Amino acid sequence: MSINYPTRDQFGMYANKSGPGPALMGADTLLGNDVYNKDGEDLGDIKEFMIDMASGRVAYAVLSFGGVFGMGEKLFAVPWAALKLDTENKRFTLNVNKDALKDAPGFDPDHWPSMADKIWATGVHKFYGTPYQVD
Amino acid sequence: MSINYPTRDQFGMYANKSGPGPALMGADTLLGNDVYNKDGEDLGDIKEFMIDMASGRVAYAVLSFGGVFGMGEKLFAVPWAALKLDTENKRFTLNVNKDALKDAPGFDPDHWPSMADKIWATGVHKFYGTPYQVD
């Protein structure tokens, strides 16, 4: 069984239709959720959400592209704006094809980048075609 | 030992000074972290972060005020802007005194509110004195 937000809903926040979802979703319930592209290919899954503490924005999701590279090699920071929650399939969609991901800027799990660094951030946003918004 | 973000840093994102923190912090590493007030009183801890999916903002942290009410009774949505990360003590600060929290708007863990509801949100922001920002 794949991991998705209903299976990780330990508090029952999605148990009632009158609850917070899908407008507001629990970060913990979205961890481990699958990420597919628009071609329906499994790209990987969500490992972490990086919060810009000053603005309160989720700046990046940290992904493992296990569907592309195999597990456990590198991690990838993907801008929030590049991801879309697919509430029908209960997973995220990232509109990048598998081949292109081979050039995605990744990092070693033992050496996380300085994500506040503007040069690093500019490169990441350029790759995914998302606006780099400095609050 | 209390739970805090270094103890929950399974990926080692804070292991190097050149990493993302404290400007960007991993949501998963902040779960379970303590929340104190400015008087140094233990109020409770972080149970979840609610992401406004359209804007990517962390709209609320969901807290259990175990230091005020005892464990497991109710949960409380606290606007992100009401919380501050105390990097010295590795915990959050919520500037509300213990007595006032007895009037905080809470909910039963089995019945999470519709957090996109404007009347609910207005009440919560009014209690904590934070601006209710509709993106």
Image (cartoon, coloured by chain):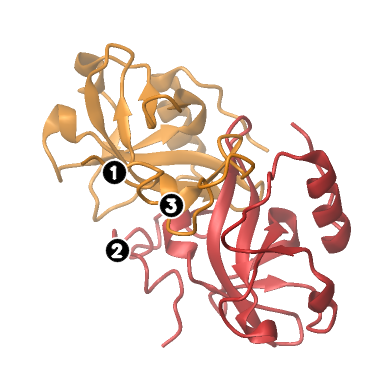
Chain colours: A orange, B red
Alpha carbons under labels 3 and 1: distance apart: 11 Å
Return the residue at label 3. Answer: A9
The secondary element bearing badge 1 is classed as loop
Let me know if residue A27 appears in the view: yes
Q: What's the amino acid at mark 3? A: Asp
Cβ atoms at labels 2 and 1 below 8 Å apart: no
Residue placed under numbered mark 1 in the picture: A3
Q: Residue furthest left?
A: A70
Identify residue type, mark 2: Gln
- Which residue in the structure is indicated by mark 2? B10
Which chain contains the residue that carries disc 2?
Answer: B
The numbered dot on residue A92 is: none
Residue that lies at the very extreme toward the top in this rendered image: A39
What percent of the width, then of the height, locates residue B16? 34, 62
Residue A36, percent across and down? Answer: 30, 24
Chain label for disc 3: A
